Image (tube, grey):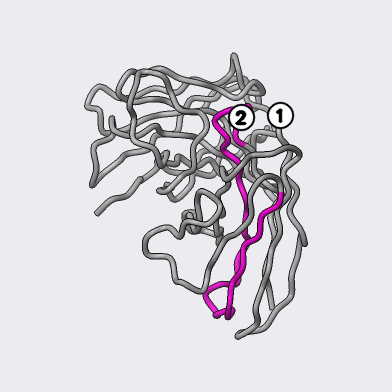
Amino acid sequence: DIQMTQSPSTLSASVGDRVTITCRASQSITFWLAWYQLKPGKAPKLLIYKASTLESGVPSRFSGSGSGTDFTLTISSLQPDDFATYYCQQYNPYSGPVAFGQGTKVDI
Amino acid sequence: QVQLVQSGAEVKKPGASVKVSCKASGYVLTRYNMHWVRQAPGQGLEWMGTINPSSDSTSYAQKFQGRVTMTRDTSATAVSMELSSLRSEDTAVYYCARGIVVVVSATPNAQDAFDLWGQGTMVTVSS
């Protein structure tokens, strides 16, 4: 099975900062990667799918890049509503069950 | 409004079973696979399996084979997930999540991204 490794596990930032979270797959997943935002007590939210496609309604300050094994989620200018935990997920149709990274908590 | 609404919190004893429901509104349930994902306290997300509501076919993560059952209700507006032989390690928030890909066959699409999530159901297993 594919393993997903996110870094960092915790990130301290301020409003207005540019934030980058990385996700590495144990083998190539081409572009089959999604990013989610989780907040306590709220339904998780899809941000990015197919590595770089912005989900409808998601602010343009979020962007995704990468292919193969290395991927990045970038928040261009951190807003107060963005303090949350972010997870990557691989869903390559050709390589076993979906798998999530261990999460990155973005706090002040 | 397109949404998934889950049943309420549950407290169960070890060895018991729990059934969590997920009602879909604002879209046709049978058009998309429904997945179940859980998050134990302080832990990450874990995929449990999926059901294709148009065919009722399922695909489960190996870890849960033999203990999990995913079904669609007869009204075709809700799905349920039943987990048996509960142990303390099953204490978690359980989410239903809609697959992003439209159903095109009877086979459940286990490899999917999830574009709509329920609010989560807390299941506590404690003696």
Chain at tag 1: A
Kindly identify the amino acid type of the residue bearing the numbered disc 2: Pro
Residue A2 spot, x, y in % from top left: 71, 34
Q: Residue at x 66, y 73 (%)?
A: A19
Picture quadrant of residue A40: bottom right
Tag 1 or tag 2, which sits nearer the N-term? 1
User: Tag 1, which secondary structure?
Assistant: loop
Compare residues B123 and A67 and report the one nearer the observer. A67
Residue B2 falls left or right of residue B126: left
Q: Residue at x 46, y 72 (%)?
A: A60
* CB atoms of marks 2 and 1 within 8 Å: yes
Query: Disc 2 marks which residue?
Result: A97
- Let me know if marks 2 and 1 both belong to one chain: yes
Residue A86 falls left or right of residue B71: right
Compare residues B49 and A51 and report the one nearer the observer. A51
Query: Disc 1 marks which residue?
Result: A1
The answer to whether B33 is drawn above or below residue A56 in the figure is above
- Looking at the rendering, the stretch of residues picked out in magenta corresponds to A70-98
Residue A94 falls left or right of residue A23: left
Q: Residue at x 25, y 44 (%)?
A: B25
Q: Is residue B86 magenta?
A: no
Kindly identify the amino acid type of the residue bearing the numbered disc 1: Asp
Quarter of the C terminus of chain A within the rendering: bottom right
